[in-house]
Amino acid sequence: MGETLNVTSSAEKKSLTLQKALSLFLAFGIHAVSMKDISDTVSISKKTLYLFFSSKEVLIKACVKKLIDQHLKEISLIENRAISSIEKVFLIYKSSLRHIANQNLAFYNDMKRDYPDIYSFYINGYGDFLNNKIFILLSEGQRNNEILAEIDLDVFCQTIFFKLKEFFSNKYRHQKNRQERILDCAILISLKRILKKPDLINWK
């Protein structure tokens, strides 16, 4: 069942274990995956696993941090593209929807029920970071006279993230048409309404 670790250092073993644990949690949920399942998957003893992560809760929090970091790397690639700030905002929201939709709903439900502090860290911490990123980009667009001056950007960011949070618990979020509907109705229309010339933006 397990696979042999083709790594030499303890740090490499720990990194691979974390990645495998995250994959299992996202695929089957937290409750369905035991520490033994994880140790068997990476072919290490439970004793070694507990040396890496002193408890399942510690492992889950490390997995959540890794999950956030993975998405932030994708956001950084978008930020570095030679496109307008508004197009960056749209692509970041699009990336966020895909990030949410690609995960098993059981992962979030288990975390919310059994590890509320970690769930709060994930939702609120991730949300604050995302809103800050979006706010900076939208502020740039407002300074460049692309966004209507009367728009309260903080309220706009909070409103869109509220819709993203609803998508977290949507059992149909894996459906491609549902993702596109949320993208169009909750995000695209909202963005177009605050722009002076929405037709000049590449919405792809």
Image (cartoon, rainbow, N blue to C red):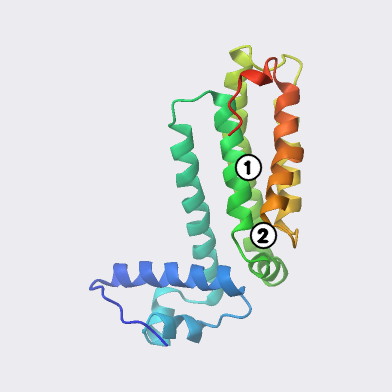
Q: Residues within 10 Å of mark 2 (few under 14, many from 20)?
A: some
Image-quadrant location for residue 194: top right
Residue at left 69%, top 72%? 114
Q: Is residue 85 above or below residue 56?
A: above
Residue under label 1, please give it: 128
Can residue 152 be seen here? no
Marks 2 and 1, how far apart at CA? 24 Å
User: Which numbered disc, 2 or 1, marks the residue that appears first in the sequence?
Assistant: 1
Rendering quarter of residue 196 = top right
Q: Where is residue 136 drawn, in percent x and y?
A: 58, 27
Q: Whole-percent x and y of residue 65?
A: 51, 57
Image coordinates of residue 195 in percent, x first then y, are: 70, 20
Q: Secondary structure at mark 2?
A: loop
- Image quadrant for the N terminus? bottom left
Looking at numbered disc 2 in the image, what kind of residue is underneath it?
His
Image quadrant of residue 154?
top right
Q: Is residue 77 left or right of residue 118?
A: left
Quadrant in the picture for the C terminus: top right
Above or below, 77 relative to 59: above
Q: Nearer the viewer, mark 2 or mark 1?
A: 2
* Vertical placement of residue 198 versus 69, above or below: above
Q: Residue at x 76, y 16 (%)?
A: 150
Residue on which disc 2 sits: 174
Q: Residues within 10 Å of mark 1 (few under 14, many from 20)?
A: some
Residue 137, label in figure: none
Count of marks overlaid on the render: 2
**Residue sticking out furthest to the top:** 145
Residue at 64% x, 15% y: name it. Answer: 146
Identify which amino acid the numbered label 1 is placed on: Asp
